[in-house]
């Protein structure tokens, strides 16, 4: 019987009454907290290394919105569906809105560092979206329909996917880490001499 197992685990006791079963749990003995020995600063976690709960929620929402934006765009390109500026602008604005919510939830250094990575991912998806929309207008997207993996094998696409997976894992872990896939790649500006 499962209730008997619960009784044993909790070291409680069972009482059977006419119309019910009562599980009594032992009261916890409370003793004053014991001071923990001091450790080296490098070994003890710093409170700012952990994400705030509100930031994690907002960050996960932003990742989901960016993933939906990128996946829907990729599906449309691979299957030859038209892409309207209105649609891409709506997707971009939804992701920008969620990024602003994540920024508003920042409350410590770990949140600030992770926000920078989320911002980098947003910019990467925005640039990739703009590139694909431009290629679609110039009828240069047939190369993506030829192979099922052509779009996924695109270096920008791979970087976005890798960074998105990293961000989700990092937020799930609760503490900040860095990864080169989420580093902002600056495009060189032409010389104007």
Image (spheres, helix red, strand yellow):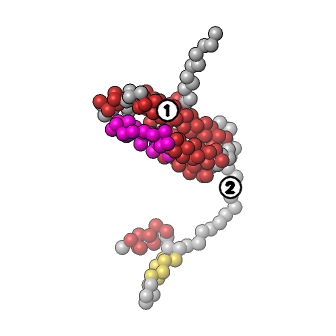
Task: Please give the name of the residue rendered at 64% of the width and 49% of the height, measured from the top-left corner.
Answer: 105
Q: Position of residue 192 (x, y in %)?
A: 62, 13
* Badge number at residue 130: 1
Residue 83 sits inside the magenta stretch: yes
Looking at the rendering, the stretch of residues picked out in magenta corresponds to 65-88
* Count of number-bearing discs: 2
Give whichever of 50, 67 is nearer the camera.
Answer: 67
| Quadrant in which residue 175 is drawn | top right
Q: Residues within 10 Å of mark 1 (few under 14, many from 20)?
A: some
Q: Residue at x 46, y 30 (%)?
A: 134
Q: What main secondary structure does the magenta stretch of the protein show?
A: helix
Which residue matches tag 2? 34
Name the residue nearer the viewer: 174 or 89. 89
Above or below — where is 52 with respect to 158? Answer: below
Residue 75: say if magenta. Answer: yes
3D distance between C-alphas at marks 1 and 2: 58 Å
Residue at image position (61%, 36%) is 116
Q: Is residue 72 visible?
A: yes
Dot 2, how many residues are within 10 Å of its Cα: few (below 14), some (14-19), or many (20+)? Answer: few
From this viewpoint, is residue 179 visible?
Answer: no
Is label 2 in a helix, a strand or a loop? loop
Q: Choose between 53 and 22: the one closer to the eye.
A: 53
Residue 24 point in image, percent of width and height: 52, 77
Residue 45: x and y in percent read: 63, 43
> What secondary structure is marked by label 1?
helix
Task: Work out which residue is located at the far top of the displayed protein and give it.
Answer: 193
Q: x%, y% of residue 74?
A: 40, 37
The quarter in which the N terminus is drawn is bottom left
Is residue 30 found left or right of 93 in the rendered image? right
For the C terminus, the quadrant is: top right
Relative to 120, does residue 193 appear above or below in the rendering? above
């Amino acid at each position: 019987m499962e209730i008997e197992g619960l009784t044993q685990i909790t070291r409680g006791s069972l009482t059977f009454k006419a119309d019910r079963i009562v599980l009594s749990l032992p009261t916890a003995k409370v003793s004053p907290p014991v001071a923990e020995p001091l450790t080296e600063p490098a070994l003890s976690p710093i409170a700012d290394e952990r994400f705030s709960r509100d930031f994690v929620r907002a960050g996960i929402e932003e990742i989901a919105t960016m993933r939906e934006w990128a996946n829907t765009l990729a599906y449309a390109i691979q299957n030859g569906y038209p892409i309207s500026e209105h649609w891409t602008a709506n997707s971009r604005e939804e992701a920008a809105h969620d990024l602003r919510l994540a920024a508003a939830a920042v409350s410590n250094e770990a949140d600030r560092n992770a926000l920078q990575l989320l911002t980098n991912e947003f910019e990467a998806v925005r640039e990739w979206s703009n590139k694909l929309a431009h290629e679609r207008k110039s009828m240069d997207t047939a190369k993506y329909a030829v192979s099922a993996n052509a779009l996924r094998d695109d270096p920008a696409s791979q970087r976005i996917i890798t960074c998105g997976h990293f961000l989700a894992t990092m937020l799930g872990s609760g503490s900040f880490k860095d990864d080169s896939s989420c580093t902002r790649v600056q495009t060189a500006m032409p010389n104007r001499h």
